[in-house]
Every structure is written in structure tokens, then in C-alpha cells.
Amino acid sequence: MDAFSFAPPPASEAAERVRAEVRAFLAQELADRPPFERADSWNGFDAEFSRKLGDRGWVAMTWPKRYGGHERSALERYVVLEEMLAAGAPVGAHWIADRQSGPLIMKVGTDKQKDEVLPRIAAGECFFCIGMSEPDSGSDLASVRTKATKVQGGFVVNGTKVWTTNAHRAHYMILLCRTGEVTANRHAGLSQFLVDLKAADVEINPIIDIAGQHHFNEVVFKDTFLPDDAVLGEVGGGWAQVTSELALERSGPERFLSSFTLVVELLRALGPNPSPQATIAIGRLVAHFVTLRRLSRSVAGMLQAGADPAVQAAVVKDLGALIEQEIPEIARGLIAAEPDTRSTSDFVAVLAHTVLNAPSFSLRGGTREILRGMIARGLGLR
Amino acid sequence: MSEMRDMFVETAERLLRDHCTPALLREAAATGELPAGLWAAMVDAGLTKAAVAEDAGGSGADLADALALLVPAGRHGAPGPLAETLLAGWLLGRVGIAVPDEPLALAVPRAGEVIRFSDGAEGPRLAGRVTRVPWARAASGGIVVIADGSAGPVLALARPAGGAVSPAANLAGEPRDDVAFDGAAVEVAAASPVGRDEAWALGAAARSAQMAGALQTVLALSVQYAQDRVQFGKPLAKLQVIQQNLAIIATQAAAAAAGADAAIEAAGHDLSSLAIGAAKARAGEAASIACNIAHQVHGAIGFTREHALHVSTQRLWSWRDEFGNDAFWQQRLGERAVAAGADGLWAMITAAA
Ligand SMILES: Cc1cc2nc3c(=O)[nH]c(=O)nc-3n(C[C@H](O)[C@H](O)[C@H](O)COP(=O)(O)OP(=O)(O)OC[C@H]3O[C@@H](n4cnc5c(N)ncnc54)[C@H](O)[C@@H]3O)c2cc1C
């Protein structure tokens, strides 16, 4: 069962050096950041902060220097990510570009696209959003209906994308849409486009999430013209590209650290003499974090070695989401509190934030059921 | 991971696959006896003294290599004190005591128990009882005891007096005997390189490795059964709810394996590492979830002595409570987290593994 073997994460002294640097940096930068905002980590959008990380070389860490990257190892990058998340740094602005859009462009983009976009991502000043989901296409992504029709000099796009995180403040969208007719092969006829959101004529409408925040959007394409050089990769090759992109989306430390701020505030609220029951509950979480980190770092190592750990990534994300969602339940079982995002108690405010956001942990980036379906395929069951 | 470890693990895997037949496992569980042929084969392959130096008659691997052998041992449900002999041999070797070829047991007093060591005019003596010593009755090489001496922990190789071993067993029929050490013959003793807590952690690391192996078998058997069993005109494996449940077993097995890998690495240099408690606690949780689903998928046939599933599930149900159950280790980890404090928690986790 090769799909289920997790290679030992390679040791990296360089990574531990970076860790110390990042900790020192964050201790200063985030000194005044309240826990409620820390809890937002990879949803937190702060262009200024992203630029600072770009200056320090902590964006595009593994990319070639020629594109503004730093040619560091995947493990060093991993350490930077997990330190940012554990500390609750606002990394949302550049997160998607660094994690998946940039690497995808590097893999399939034209020289012009690479030269134009990658160095700006690396500088921490160019942000991306993901145009995959549609009103009628969620888990069944291959059913997308947004259509790009070939015209003189480019394409005309019609259709609607939804749940597009950061569309209202990103510079680019990578759009998945149909360029060919629907045939028996559902995965054929799909293509990706690099959409310059500042230039293209699209309508971006806010969708307020359950927590009252504006992170995601509806993006409407109405006879929107995209020039030929906006095609990303191969016309008709969109499905293969989008699946390789999703593998990058699934195994990172953001897939088990979403509720970490709540654990920190819980521990603080419990004080120096918690009950045995509380001590045991905290210890259980420690055991989960230790094993999840190991699994997640293992996937980082396998990616670095050029393997394709798609099933392993699904394993990490499924296990991670389970514990992320259990954390608010554990917290409220140990400390009686009525959750309130405006509370002056850090614990209560962070609890409220986490309760409200928890449902998304097993939806975004592939639902629990879809991930388990991938794992079942890895087991040879389908 | 060293080449030596890979080679050892492969040898163990092959040997145990050949020897651990359903008939042998049934017989061992029913009688609580050590299968002589299996043990002899493990001795011949150098597995039982893996972590004993070559000049002391061992295979010269390190503790981590030895612990890694316990993953295949758990996978095949190998009956016998392989874990105990490996750990006891490693301890004896560390203080320069010659390691016998025969099977060894390891007696670590638990909370509320104590073995006192004295060395007076009538020679070295032990006093006290230890309950549920794994494979004590089969330890023809002797029982390695972590005793309390006047100047700290003492490691003694002892042979209990006749009648001092009262047989008991875990759910899988593995001997877990009560041993009275009063009047035992103390063959040799030395200042112990580990205290009770560290010896207990050694046991926990060993069980974590065994559990990781057993969980792989629970997964493999369940996948196979779902593919073979036909209901409503199609294999169970075609039903989505079955697929999703089997996926859960796979994720739990992966978590236990990752924990065990980290514990094996950590045990090699630091028996107080957080990684060991994390592995044992996480494996315990994984075992509960995986066994539950595996039995559901297997239906009534899995609820029999005839089917092989119980070999792994009964061991898992036993091992999760040996050398500290989930709550025991969670509490230890929790205490360390509390000591680290809210702002030291993350640094503690990253330092662990
Ligand atoms: C916070 C957040 C941010 C997001 N950001 C983006 C973004 O930036 N860009 C983007 O493109 N998308 C984004 N998404 C959308 C996300 O990718 C989808 O929510 C996800 O793919 C599921 O699609 P759906 O919501 O339409 O649910 P559906 O696919 O309709 O599923 C509903 C339920 O049915 C289950 N289900 C569906 N199919 C099956 C099946 N075959 N077997 C068993 N069960 C099934 C699902 O698991 C789920 O439980 C975001 C979502 C959230 C919550």
C-alpha cells in the first residue's frame, strides 16, 4: 500500500535556523496583535505584512532565483508556514499565490506569464484567488459550466464563480472553465486562464460568511474578453492542471492548525493548576499535534523529493480537520462560557471565532467525503 | 533510517509472515506457550538480540532499530516476548551484563508497586511483587527487574522461586503474569541506566510500534473482506459508506504509524521525549476507532475465533492499556504543556519530533 507510506521527514538544520529567525521576527511584529485576530491567521489579509515577508525572503522560498525565489528547501518553507500559523500571523494575502498559483504558473505558464507575475508574488505584493467552484459545481468540479468561447485574439467568457476567497482584493484569478463541448470524457475540454482582475471586465459581489466577515465572493463573467495570452497551460488540459494544484492545497500545516490559537488561549485560561480532566484533554491535543506535524512534514519531504503524495495529503487534511473541529468542543467542555466574538475575554472571543469558522474546515479544499473517497481509491476500493 | 534497520525489518517481516500461521497463533493464544520453532527462527536470524553489541553476542543494532522490528511483529501478531527480550537485552547490555540467548521478561513496577533490592551478608536479594509481567512464565533467560536500591534504581536479572509466578493473560491470550520476587535468585545486578519512568516509556514505545503494525493488519483485512464479501449482489467495497469507513481506518493507521516512527527515533536518544507518550496515546485512540469499524465491516464472522481479525483487535484492545493507557500519557503530556504555558506550547510541540 504505497499510497499510504509516509517517508520520515528529512532532518534539516537549515530549517531550524529559519525557525529561530521567524520566531524572533514574529515576536516583534505581532507583539500587539490580539488573540481574536491571531485566530484568523490564514484568513487574515494584510498586504503590508505580506510585503514584509517578501522582503525577508519568506515568500516563494523554494522557487528559482530567476523568478524572485530563494531556492530554499521544502522543509524550510514548511517551518516558515507553521511558525506563521502557530503565531497567528496574517498571511492570507499572499497565501494562495505562494502555495498553489505561483507553482502552477511555474509549471505550465508561458515565459511572459512567469516573468510578469512570479517575481511580484515573490515580493509579497501580488495576490491570487481560485476560480474553481460555481453555483452548480462544488465537489463535482468537472461539471463547471462557465464557458470560454474562442474569438479573434482571445476568448469570451460567460458564467459565474462562487466562494472565491479574496476575489475583491486579489490581482489575479486562476479560472477553470470549459473551452470544449461536454463529451463522454468529463475531464476533457477544460482549461485554465490567468485572469488579470484589474483589467478584465468582471463583476465581483461580496458574500458575507457565517461569521459576518467578507472573505469570499461571487464573480460574474458576462461576455468578458480575455486575450489569448491569458490561457494558462494547455487549452483542454485544465483538469490535469487543476488536480496537481489541489494536491498542493491539501497537506500544509494550515490543514491542522486552524484552531491552534484557541488551544493557546484555552491553556492560558486554564491557568497553572488545571483539573486532571483538563490536563488530559490538553495532553490529548498535544499527541494529535505531534503526530499531525510528523505526517504533514512527511508530505512536504515527499513533495520535495518529487513524489506525488496526493493520497497522503488527503489523509493529513482529513485527520487535521477532525481535530480542528473538535478543539472548540473540547474548549467549551472545559470552560463554561457563552461564546461572543465581541467579548473582552480573549478565550471567549477566540472560542466564538472558532465555533463559527469550524464548519468550513472540512469543506474548503475538498470536503471530508471527497477526501475519504480519494483515500478509498488509494485503498483500491474504487 | 539506517540500511541496517531496513534489512532487519525486512528479515523480520519475511520470517514472521512464514511462521505466524493461523494455526500457530490459535495454539499460542489457547495455551499461552511460546512457540518454540518461531523463537528459534528469530534467534537464528539475530532478531532477539538485535540491540545487543556484537562483541556481546548480539547483532549490534541500536535501540531504535530494535523497536522498528516490533512493527512487523505487531503486524503478524507474533506470539512471544520479542519486545520484552529486545528491551531487557538492551538494558543488560548497557551495564555490561552478559545477555542470555533465551527469552527474557521485563518487570517494571507500576504505581503502587515496588521491588526492593538489598545486598547484605546473604548476597543480593529482591523483595516485592509486580503484577502482569509480560511473558514472565516463558522467560527461561530470566526476568530483568527495575528495582529500588539504596543508592537509586537497580537493574537485576532474576529467576523467581518455584510457584512465584501466577499465570494471567491479556485479552489476546498473551501471558501477563503476577510475579513475587521474594526469594528469587538474583543472578546479577548493577546500577540501572534507567529509572522506572524511563523503563515504562521503553515499554510504551514498544507497544506503540506493535500497535502501528497491528493497525496495518486491521486495515488490510478489512479492505480484503469488503472486496470479497458480496451482499445485495455486489461487493461491500462498492458501497460508499463502507469505502468511507475504511478510509477512516486508513487515516487512523497512518496517524499511529507516524506516532510510532517518531517514538522509535526519539527512544534512541531520549526516553523522556514527548514523542513517546504522544505515540502511545495516539495509537490507543487509533486502535479504538479502527477496531470498532473493522468489526462492523466484518459482521458476524469477525466476531469469531475462527476468523483472523481477532488476533489483531484483541492485541490492540490489550496493548492500548499496557505501559500506560491513553489517559495516562495524555496527562503526562498535558502536565508538560501546562508547565510550558500558553506561550511555550508551540515551541514544546516543535521540539518533540
Ligand atoms: C471558507 C471557504 C472558502 C472557499 N474558497 C474557495 C475559493 O477560493 N475558490 C473556490 O473555487 N472554491 C472555494 N470554496 C468552495 C469549496 O471548494 C467547496 O465548498 C467545496 O468544493 C464543496 O462544494 P459545495 O460547497 O458546493 O458542496 P457540495 O459539493 O454540494 O457538497 C455538499 C455535501 O455533499 C457531500 N457530497 C458531494 N458529493 C458527494 C459524493 N460524491 N459522495 C458523498 N458526499 C458527497 C459533500 O461532501 C458535502 O458534505 C470555499 C469554501 C469555503 C467554505
Image (cartoon, rainbow, N blue to C red):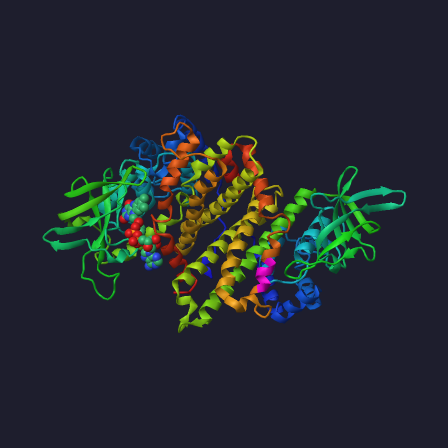
Q: Residue at x 38, y 59 (%)?
A: A373
Residue B314 part of the magenta segment: yes
Residue that protrudes farthest toward the left in the picture: A152
Point out the stretch of residues depicted in magenta: B310-315
Residue B353: % across, % down: 53, 43
Residue A150 figure quarter: bottom left
Identify whether A156 is placed above or below B307: above
Magenta region's main secondary structure?
A: helix
Residue B343 makes an appearance in the image: no
Instruction: Name the residue located 24 percent from the left edge and 39 percent from the top edge.
Output: A170
Q: Is residue A35 left or right of residue A124?
A: right
> Viewed as shown, does residue B240 lie left or right of A128?
right
Q: Position of residue A260 (x, y in %)?
A: 44, 38
Q: Quadrant of residue B177?
A: bottom right
A184 to B323, vertically: above or below? below
- Residue nearest the viewer, comparing B232 with B346: B232
Residue A280 to residue B294: above or below: above
Indicate yes or no whether the magenta region holds residue B114: no
Q: Is residue A233 left or right of residue B255?
A: left
Please report the residue visible at 40 percent of the width from the left and 48 percent of the height from the top.
A251
Relative image position of residue B110 (x, y in whole percent):
69, 46
Can the viewer see residue B48?
yes
| Residue B210 percent coordinates (x, y) | 59, 56
**In which quadrant is the C terminus of chain A drawn?**
bottom left
- Front residue of B107/A266: it is A266
